[in-house]
Image (spheres, helix red, strand yellow):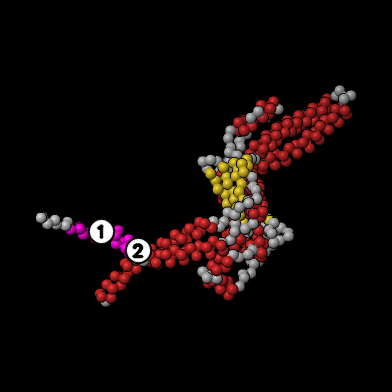
């Protein structure tokens, strides 16, 4: 009978991972992992239940994109040509890129107007501005209070010691940049999370969202932001053409008065000199007639330019196609309680597993440290 020799198991290299040893270590510390996961689950439930409720109102818009003047005006160019107006020489203002729109929403003048927007909240019979809601009536969540008096406790103590800063007194009729009060600055920092505008450059549409603790107030704020955004963009785009229109309108009104006066003067001269055949009355009539002709020519040219300027303003005025109008949200957008619970469960598992494997790594290091010491 031959003796069968058992092939020895090759030793594990230093740079290889012994999966069996890892599994044994994990199984040995399974209680620690389970306790950590349960702790994470408890914390997840607490955080999910105490997180403030938030509703999101949404509006989807498609902005007008500039193109060729004739293609925009379509058949209007032919009708204008019949009236003696040449639209081919009209120079439109440059289009404001939709990529700039989020900068408008986050600008301080825009946000200051949004702060003063009256909104309807459940606990108030009268509309309350967004600024007053956050500075006078806003309720602090439990998690917010915990954060304020733990992590933010040094800042609270410093503010109590310093006291509320006095408003900056400025001389009257002083042209200065925008100056925010301390309360306005605090609310302005919240506005970036309350109102958001996302631009989808590929699809070519804008998504405006407003986030507030109450559904009706969120919808009202989104509608106000949509209207205000259109107003700002319109003002930016037609500023140059509107200034040109105002200038031409002023010159047109002046020339119209001069033309009407020249008309009356010519009629009076013709009536007075119609029975005279001498040279002097004829010279006077010709002089008034020349003045009338020149005034009429200027008046006629300005009338054409006025119509061109009006058409240009209409052309440059942006138009938003509302794909999805603002509606009162029926479901909460935050908190996502299942996701919060899952994240805390995952964190609990990671922390417990890290503790189990880290402990076996740290203990030999401690022994070696003591031996060498």
Depth check, mark 2 against mark 1: the one in front is 2
Image position, residue 63 (x, y; %): 60, 41
The answer, for residue 109, to whether it is visible in the render is no
The answer, for residue 92, to whether it is visible in the render is yes
Question: Residue sitting at 67 percent across and 52 percent down?
Answer: 220
Question: Residue sitting at 60 percent across and 57 percent down?
Answer: 54
Residue 147 part of the magenta segment: no
Q: Are marks 2 and 1 in contact (CB under 8 Å)?
A: no
Magenta extent: 8-25
Which quarter of the figure has residue 22? bottom left
Image position, residue 126 (x, y; %): 73, 59
Q: CA distance from mark 2 to mark 1?
A: 23 Å
The residue that label 1 is drawn on is: 15
Q: Nearer the viewer, residue 117 or 50?
A: 50
Q: Nearer the viewer, residue 138 or 1?
A: 1
The residue that label 2 is drawn on is: 27
Residue 14 part of the magenta segment: yes
Left or right: 2 as drawn, with respect to 308: left
Tell me the quarter of the image containing the N terminus.
bottom left
Left or right: 372 as drawn, with respect to 339: left
Number of residues whose C-alpha sits closer than 10 Å to that of mark 2, classed few (under 14), some (14–19) or many (20 or more): few
């Amino acid at each position: 009978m031959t003796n069968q020799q058992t092939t020895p198991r090759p030793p594990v290299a230093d740079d290889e991972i012994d999966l069996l040893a890892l599994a044994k270590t994990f199984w040995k510390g399974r209680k620690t992992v389970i306790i950590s996961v349960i702790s994470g689950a408890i914390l997840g439930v607490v955080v999910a239940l105490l997180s403030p409720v938030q509703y999101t109102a949404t509006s989807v818009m498609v902005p007008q994109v500039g193109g060729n003047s004739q293609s925009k005006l379509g058949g209007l160019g032919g009708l204008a040509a019949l009236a003696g107006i040449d639209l081919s020489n009209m120079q439109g203002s440059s289009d404001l890129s939709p990529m700039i729109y989020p900068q408008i929403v986050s600008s301080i003048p825009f946000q200051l107007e949004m702060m003063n927007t009256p909104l309807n909240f459940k606990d108030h019979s009268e509309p309350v501005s967004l600024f007053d809601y956050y500075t006078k009536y806003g309720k602090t969540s439990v998690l917010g209070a915990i954060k304020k008096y733990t992590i933010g406790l040094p800042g609270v103590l410093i503010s109590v010691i310093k006291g509320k800063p006095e408003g900056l007194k400025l001389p009257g009729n002083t042209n200065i940049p925008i100056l925010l009060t301390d309360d306005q600055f605090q609310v302005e920092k919240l506005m970036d999370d309350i109102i958001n505008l996302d631009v989808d450059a590929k699809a070519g549409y804008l998504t405006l969202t407003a986030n507030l603790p109450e559904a009706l107030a969120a919808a009202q704020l989104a509608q106000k932001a949509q209207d205000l955004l259109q107003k700002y963009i319109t003002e930016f785009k037609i500023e140059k053409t509107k200034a040109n229109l105002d200038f031409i309108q002023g010159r047109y009104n002046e020339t119209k008065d001069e033309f009407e006066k020249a008309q009356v003067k010519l009629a009076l001269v013709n009536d007075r000199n119609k029975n005279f055949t001498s040279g002097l009355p004829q010279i006077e009539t010709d002089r008034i007639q020349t003045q009338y002709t020149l005034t009429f020519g200027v008046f006629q040219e300005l009338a054409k330019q006025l119509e061109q300027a009006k058409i240009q303003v209409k052309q440059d005025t942006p138009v938003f196609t509302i794909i999805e109008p603002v509606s009162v949200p029926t479901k909460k957008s935050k908190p996502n309680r299942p996701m919060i619970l899952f994240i805390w469960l995952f964190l609990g598992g990671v922390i417990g597993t890290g503790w189990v494997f880290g402990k076996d790594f740290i203990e030999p290091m401690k022994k070696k440290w003591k031996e060498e010491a």
